[in-house]
Amino acid sequence: MSPFEISSHAQPEFVFNSRRSPVYATKGMVASSQPLATEAGLEILRAGGNAADAAIAVAAALAVAEPCSTGLGGDAFALYYEAGSKNVFALNGSGKSAQDISLEKVNAMGISGELPLRHAMTVNVPGALALWADLVEQHGSLSLATILGPAIRYAMQGFPVSPVTAELWNEGAKILHNSPGGKQLLLNGNAPRCGEIMLNRNLGLLLARLADCSPEDAKKIFYEGDIAEKIVRIVRDNGGFLSTEDMAAHSSLFQESISVNYRGYEIHECPPNGQGLAALLALNTLADIDVAALGAPESPQRLHHLIEAMRLAFADARLHVADPQLYSTPLEKLLSPSYGAQRASLIFPDRAKLDNVSGVPINSSDTVYFCVVDKDGNGCSMVNSNYLGFGTGIVPEGLGFSLQNRAHNFSLDPAHPNVLAPGKRSYHTIIPGICLREDKTLHSTFGVMGGFMQPQGHMQVISAMIDDHADPQEALNRLRFCIEPGEAGATVAKVKLRRLLRPILVVSN
């Protein structure tokens, strides 16, 4: 692939050219990967809802319109900015591994290196629904019936499949054909084509059932009743370890966001087990470097310094991102200005640091990012994901969603903090971001889809907006680098410079 070739999902070449200017509004803003989902969020804002209400409306609509990337079988992370208090709240909606799984068991099965990519044993408890309910309960203002209304309508009445989703659905069709229950997400045995009308009545009925109660009761319905039993049954019937006790024990984590100061702006991320730490580590390293003085945004010198900062950040993140309830990441030390300066000193202007392996094992775009700012200045930055396309591809009978394969991100090294263990949250790629000004007012909500591209995208869009004073659309239109795995035994990861099909989305206040 040449440095400026646009990566494509399928042939013929799949290219969109952007000639957009920034969009402005006074009563709120919604950004997502699907026009129908964005419209769902706007519908809730027009109905008097706030950023939390609208964000969950978007999440639910995306679960219907982009099931290859997201849904109730996956996990979610959110950052919420409360304008009144000027505080950022972090909500971790990742589920734990089964209590019945262990490193010893998988080793006895002859598994080494990593868990099988699409196997039922990679299904952790899906945490998305609990996060939806908790975000509404903690920060929302409308009922679930109102919030989930647009998604229920799309599922029951049908929706036209968008071009990107059609491509991703087609890529996942073979997975669905070969996975238990997967054919339930196909249209007459095939992936729906671009523009075809797709219905998902099973998901619509499930959402309607959840909508007809309080957020707390919605969690009980999903995690303690027949829905949980259906999820557990299909997982265990296909060699997985999840139990109804695992489902019933699930709860979201309410956390304090982590942040660094980047040239007077506070950049906030969710703490581990998400990889937002990698973005902050890279920015903390760049804080000691005059990025703007290195040359134009696409100049070799500037790209070299950003890439090296990101490689250093990945090396640290891969060592320290793990379940926060089982491993204490040294956040204060890692995010201190002195550590950033120390890491910056390891960047050589004329060469790469060959003994620093970035540790980026896989790159994927099967995630949805979206963000909302309401008329009062509250902001929600959120990611919801099945991990790889359709996750495992396993679809519980009559529920209308596939189950994620997040346990694939566990290490099978017994000495690693992220080692596979019972009842444990795995390393997570999905990360939302929020940027505050010096006076703690909201500057932007931002994020990116794409596995291990996410912290790389966070760093690059923040650098563009702060170092170069770029507006959000200008930042999005730039070429961006993406560090990917090198060949076996390589000391330096491959780097691609390209325009991404799944762009960063930013709402700037």
Image: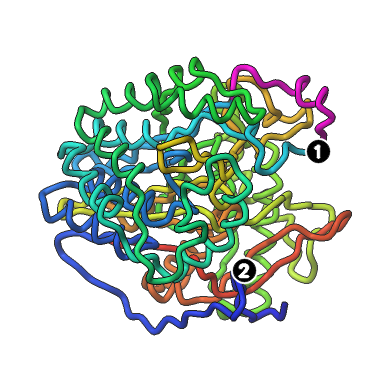
Magenta region's main secondary structure?
loop
| Left or right of 167, for residue 18 | left
Q: Which mark is residue 482?
A: none
Q: Quadrant of the N terminus?
A: bottom right
Q: Is residue 276 visible?
A: no
Q: Quadrant of residue 412?
A: top right
Front residue of 367/298: it is 367
Residue 7 position, x and y percent, is 62, 73
Residue 489 position, x and y percent, is 88, 54
Mark 1, Cα crowd under 10 Å, few <14 / some 14-19 / many 20+, is: few
Could you tell me the amino acid type at mark 1? Gly
Q: Contact, CB < 8 Å: mark 1 with mark 2?
A: no
Residue 360 position, x and y percent, is 70, 52
| Left or right of 88, for residue 163 | right
Mark 2, Cα crowd under 10 Å, few <14 / some 14-19 / many 20+, is: many
Front residue of 408/278: it is 408
Residue marked by disc 1: 113
Q: Is residue 270 visible?
A: yes
Residue 214 position, x and y percent, is 21, 27
